[in-house]
Image (spheres, rainbow, N blue to C red):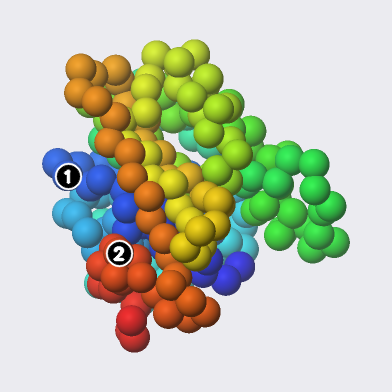
Amino acid sequence: MKVGTDAVLLGAWANTDQCKNILDIGTGTGIIALMLAQRSQAEIDAIDIDAEACIQAKENVASSEFAERVKVMQISCSEFARRNSSLKKYDLIVSNPPYFINSLKCPDNKRTVARHTDSLLLSDLVEDACSLLSPAGRIALVLPYERLDEVEELAAANHLQIQRQTDVIPVPGAMPKRLLVELSAPQDNIKNRNILTIEEARHQYTPEYIALTKDFYLKM
């Protein structure tokens, strides 16, 4: 799997303040886990159901300067939650989950697992994440924008609320395509919501996108 814009956005956007333990669900190549390691001093667990993805993630972690703080494990989200919910709590849980629900599936089964909700429903992800979350912990997700209503419903059902939300627009004047959202226990403060435009024109990134992601590109 190639490194996509969704992963880069989430890895750069998620709030790592005061994080001691972070969990990356569906780590893939490990890109988000490594970005969060670069932005914090936290211990990071990265899980994925796919064996080859875990092999690649382990290779990437071993080649980085963060190898001592990032642990990659091949395990499903539900199994990991069942084994660990009473043992370890996380200050931040991130995921770039599968999101194609009814679209045509790819003949490559690994790509299908990574992109379709067959292997990880959003409702199960949020519920499992809640069982692993510390009292002041946060869940940060990147999703198609049209799933905002679903996220709001799932947050309410799990006694959470949206604390931060960024609507991601590909070019000026376009409708939002992606949603960066942070869930946590209800607080008195008003939700922080903004808009991020990625490009001014083809391959011409906006100052806001450059400011958010420049620390992770060799050339930006």
User: Is residue 181 in view?
Assistant: yes
Residue at 29 percent across and 70 percent down: it is 207
Q: Quadrant of residue 138?
A: top left
**Residue 31 found in image quarter:** bottom left
Q: Quadrant of the C terminus?
A: bottom left
In percent of the image, x 58 and y 46: which residue is there? 144
Q: Is residue 66 above or below residue 50?
A: below
Q: CA distance from mark 1 to mark 2?
A: 20 Å
- Residue beneath the point at 41% across and 24% down: 130
Crowdedness near tag 2: few (<14), some (14–19) or many (≥20) residues, C-alpha within 10 Å: some
Q: Would residue 6 be visible to someone looking at this image?
A: no
Q: Is residue 106 shown left or right of residue 165?
A: right
* Disc 2 residue type (three-letter): Glu
- In the current view of this chain or complex, which residue is farthest to the bottom? 219
Label 2 SS: helix
Q: From the image, tell me which residue sits under label 2.
A: 208
Q: Is residue 150 above or below residue 45?
A: above
Q: Of the residues under marks 1 and 2, which one precedes in the sequence?
A: 1
Q: Mark 1 is on which residue type?
A: Asp
Q: Secondary structure at mark 1?
A: loop
x%, y% of residue 20?
19, 42
User: Residue 147: x percent and y percent?
Assistant: 58, 36
Query: x, y (%) of residue 91?
Result: 26, 35
Q: Height in image: 89 above or below 1?
A: above
Q: Which residue is mark 1?
A: 17
